[in-house]
Each structure stands twice: as structure tokens, then as C-alpha cells.
Amino acid sequence: GAVVSQHPSWVICKSGTSVKIECRSLDFQATTMFWYRQFPKQSLMLMATSNEGSKATYEQGVEKDKFLINHASLTLSTLTVTSAHPEDSSFYICSALDRFHYNEQFFGPGTRLTVL
Amino acid sequence: DQQVKQNSPSLSVQEGRISILNCDYTNSMFDYFLWYKKYPAEGPTFLISISSIKDKNEDGRFTVFLNKSAKHLSLHIVPSQPGDSAVYFCAALSGTYKYIFGTGTRLKVLA
């Protein structure tokens, strides 16, 4: 099956610093990738939709200046949490849409961000 | 407003018995549904899906039932195995590719 990787899997940073998370589709091309956030014991909340070569579409309530998304190629999307604060601590998961299986998203393993 | 709801946060089932996980939705425009399984600190993995033109889809031990009039779907796992212990999310496809996830049900299969 299609494989999506995320890097890093776990990151701890100081408040005020920026953190970049990478999402890669390893064996397929993904014109569209998604970024989710999950708080403990809660659902996955879609943050933004990332389309290759164009600006990301953010969900209501998500600050686009805080969560910068870049989808520079068909296999890579990055999420940068700028000026991170403790309330940004969460589990961030990306998914990728296989253009030939448009109904199914393939998820990465997630990145746990802890902001001190 | 939660458009996809899983009202049971947790479920315990004896090994070998049937597990039934439920999901309700509010938007009648949803026409494709999926179930995902998730272990702690991992991304969700796809289990099974169903289109609104069907009322049942089966794959091995997993069967999904869809009742459009009630806006309800369920996932049946039989027989349940300890390795099935995980959090299960249902999701509805909104538009072309956007998923709306439920809140999840934690299944524990007791050996």
C-alpha cells in the first residue's frame, strides 16, 4: 500500500522557536496533502489542505501565519509552526491523497510536538 | 458543530465475540464513509469504506453497514481479537476529498 512518512516523529522545543514538520509520500505522487491536529482523547481536526504548487487552504479558526504550509513537490509538504507556544503542543498528522485513489487518504505516523 | 459523532467513547468485548462500533452523521450530503483504526502515537490506518449507494460492505472480519435514512453506520468486527484493541474513527467524505472525522471509540478486546 501507499506509504506516507513524517519527520521528525517527536520534537521538543522552547517557547518562541519555530518547528518544521515534513510529510512525504514515498511511493506515489500526492497532488493534495492534509494536515491534522489531534489533542488527547479527541478527534483528528483538519487544519489545512495543501495543494502542490499553490497556497494551502486553511480551516476556520486556524491561523495561517502561525501554521505555514508549503507543498513544493508532488511528494513533500511541510508544516512550520512559527513562534511555538505551549498550547501548540499536540500530535500533528499529515495525510496524502493518491491521485489514482482519490477517495482514500493515506496517513503518516504523526509528529508529537512538545513546546516547553 | 460535530457533523460526525461516535457516541461511545469506549467499548470492551471478549475475544471471539462481535464488536459493534457505531457512528452517526448529520449531513445527508455525505456519500462516502470510511473507518480507520489508530494506535497511540501512530497515524490512522484505513480499514474499510462504504459508498452511499450500498448498505453493506464486507472485508474479512470487518463489515460496515450503512443506514442512510437513519444517518447511521456501524462497523462489525467478528470474531474480535486482542490485536483489534485500538481507537476506531469513522469519517465522512465531504465534497471531493475532505474528511470529517468522528471523535473515536476506544475498543478493548479482552483475552
Image: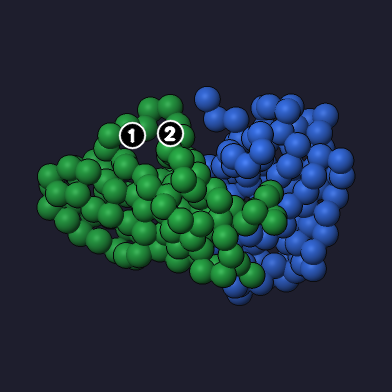
Chain colours: A green, B blue
Residue density around tag 1, few if under 14, some if 14–19, many if 20 or more, within 10 Å: some
Position of the N terminus of chain A, as image quadrant, is bottom right
Please report, as a chain letter, where disc 1 is located. Answer: A
Left or right: A104 in relation to A81:
right
Which of A69 and B45 lies nearest the eye of the viewer?
A: A69
Residue A24 coordinates in the image, percent (x, y)? 45, 62
Please report, as a chain letter, where disc 2 is located. Answer: A
Residue density around tag 2, few if under 14, some if 14–19, many if 20 or more, within 10 Å: some
Type of residue at label 1? Answer: Lys
Q: Quadrant of residue B66?
A: top right
Residue A98 vertical position relative to residue A80 in the rendered view, above or below: below
Residue visible at 45% across and 66% down in the picture: A5
Residue visible at 79% across and 68% down in the picture: B60
Q: Is residue B76 visible?
A: yes
> In the drawing, what numbered circle is on residue B107?
none
Type of residue at label 2? Answer: Tyr
Residue B20 coordinates in the image, percent (x, y)? 71, 53
Q: Quadrant of residue B57?
A: bottom right
Left or right: A9 in relation to A96:
left
Left or right: B87 in relation to B97:
left
Q: Report how many numbered discs are placed on residues in the image.
A: 2
Residue B83 coordinates in the image, percent (x, y)? 60, 72
Which of B97 and B5 lies nearest the eye of the viewer?
A: B97
> In the drawing, what numbered circle is on residue A58?
2
Q: CA distance from mark 1 to mark 2?
A: 7 Å
Residue visible at 43% across and 34% down in the picture: A58
Which of A55 and B76 lies nearest the eye of the viewer?
A: A55
Which residue is the site of mark 1? A64
Q: Earlier in the sequence, mark 1 or mark 2?
A: 2
Answer yes or no: do the residues labelled 1 and 2 have beta carbons within 8 Å?
A: yes
